[in-house]
Image: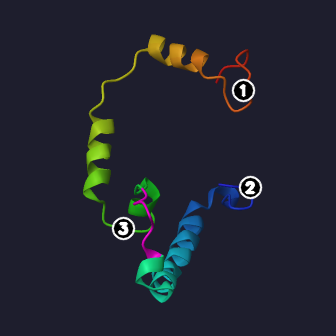
Amino acid sequence: MTIQDMPKDGDFASYLEGKMGHTADAPKAAASMGANASEPAYAPCQTIEQVLVEGQEPTQEFLEEWNAVQNAPELSDEEFERQALEAPGEDGDPSTPE
């Protein structure tokens, strides 16, 4: 989310309404492109935003991944620390781990 997209004063409801308004046009545009043009060479993974905000029905792949994440064992504080120290972060500087 960019600064321009960020809801003002916690107005998240209007942000969601705006997102839903944009997605209403997407099926019409895809239908007008033709069958071959609308089929991607790969099937992109469904996101939580597509399920919750856009109201898409969750795919079987999405549900399997969701269940795997929900049933994964919790990480210890030591494991979190180890992973944080190994990740140099966006700036790529290992002296400032995330």
Q: Residue at x 52, y 84 (%)?
A: 29
Residue 71 is one of the magenta-drawn residues = no
Badge 2, how many Cα within 10 Å: few under 14, some, many 20+?
few
- Label 1, on which residue? 92
- x%, y% of residue 66? 32, 45
**First of labels 3, 2 by sequence position:** 2
> Looking at the image, is 73 positioned above or below residue 67?
above
- Label 2, on which residue? 3
Q: Residue at x 45, y 86 (%)?
A: 34
Q: Secondary structure at mark 3?
A: loop
Disc 2 to disc 1, how far (Cα)? 23 Å
Relative to 81, is 5 on the left or the right? Answer: right
Q: Residue at x 52, y 13 (%)?
A: 82
Give 56 or 35, whichever is nearer the viewer.
Answer: 35
Q: Which residues are magenta?
A: 38-44
Q: Amino acid at mark 2?
A: Ile
Relative to 10, is 42 on the left or the right? Answer: left
Q: Amino acid at mark 1?
A: Gly
Relative to 29, is 72 on the left or the right? Answer: left
Q: Which one is in front in this view, the residue at disc 3 or the one at disc 2?
A: 3
Q: Secondary structure at mark 1?
A: loop
- Label 3, on which residue? 56
Q: Quadrant of residue 1?
A: bottom right
> Looking at the image, is 42 positioned above or below residue 38?
above
The image shows a total of numbered marks equal to: 3
Magenta highlight: main SS: loop
- x%, y% of residue 40? 45, 67
Q: Which one is in front in this view, the residue at disc 1 or the one at disc 3?
A: 1
**First of labels 2, 1 by sequence position:** 2
Disc 1 to disc 3, how far (Cα)? 37 Å
- x%, y% of residue 73? 30, 24
